[in-house]
Image (tube, rainbow, N blue to C red):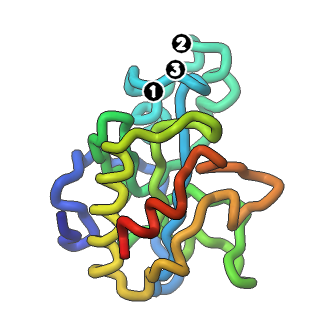
């Protein structure tokens, strides 16, 4: 797996309109998230629709609350391990919201966001961890300012506001896999 001009060569490309130019060129943070739509349910393509502004508010009551939001991560790893890319890594995806890392605000400006299909309290799959480790190693090669110390959860950059990837995420095993 490698990064070529901001695209992961083994990812399915589904472009999202929810991105912008980075105000600076340093990419130095990796943020791990989770998402499931509807909450706690997997599959169905709803995350892909959501990140591409195509989620129908009539499909589920929760969708009516979020259908008009304009957000996207750079990457999404399904439960099966399938990798989907929505935003070029060199662009700013809208994934972190109000956030700060080491005193620097607006993490979207200098981070890459990866969503895992899941929720805070349910174990992630081995396939997801394997793909996440492979992607992370490729990102660290392409963007050397991303180091193991600069890989965090959404919960770490937006404490009190976000909880993902949550207590079900095995940070120690993941860090060992990328070493």
As drawn, the label of residue 56 is: 3
Tell me: 108 left or right of 175: right
Q: Residue at x 83, y 55 (%)?
A: 160
Front-lying residue, 118 or 18 = 118
As drawn, the label of residue 59 is: 2
Q: Residue at x 34, y 61 (%)?
A: 133
Name the image quarter holding the N terminus: bottom left
Q: In the rendered view, would you say 141 is above or below 30?
A: below
The numbered mark, 1 or 2, whose residue comes first in the sequence reads: 1
The residue carrying pointer 1 sits among few (fewer than 14), some (14 to 19) or many (20 or more) residues within 10 Å by Cα, namely some
Q: Which secondary structure, mark 1?
A: helix
Find the distance from the CA under tag 1 to the CA under tag 3. Answer: 9 Å
Front-lying residue, 178 or 43 = 178
Rendered image quadrant of residue 78: top left
Q: Residue at x 45, y 27 (%)?
A: 46
Tags 3 and 2 touching, CB below 8 Å = yes
């Amino acid at each position: 797996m490698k990064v070529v001009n901001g695209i992961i060569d083994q990812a399915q490309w589904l472009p999202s309109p929810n991105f912008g130019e980075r105000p600076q060129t340093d990419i130095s943070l990796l943020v791990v998230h989770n998402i499931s739509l509807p909450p706690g349910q997997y599959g169905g393509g709803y995350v892909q629709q959501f990140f591409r502004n195509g989620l129908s508010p009539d499909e589920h009551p929760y969708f009516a609350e979020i259908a008009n939001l304009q957000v996207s991560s750079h990457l999404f790893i399904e439960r099966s391990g399938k990798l989907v890319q929505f935003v070029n890594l060199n662009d700013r995806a809208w994934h972190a919201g109000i956030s700060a890392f080491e005193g620097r605000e607006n993490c979207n400006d200098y981070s890459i966001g990866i969503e895992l299909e899941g929720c805070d309290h349910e174990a992630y799959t081995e396939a997801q961890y394997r793909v996440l480790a492979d992607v992370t190693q490729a990102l660290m090669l392409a963007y050397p300012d991303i180091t193991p110390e600069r890989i965090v959860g959404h919960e770490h950059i937006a404490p009190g506001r976000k909880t993902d990837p949550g207590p079900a995420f095995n940070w120690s095993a993941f860090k060992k896999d990328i070493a």
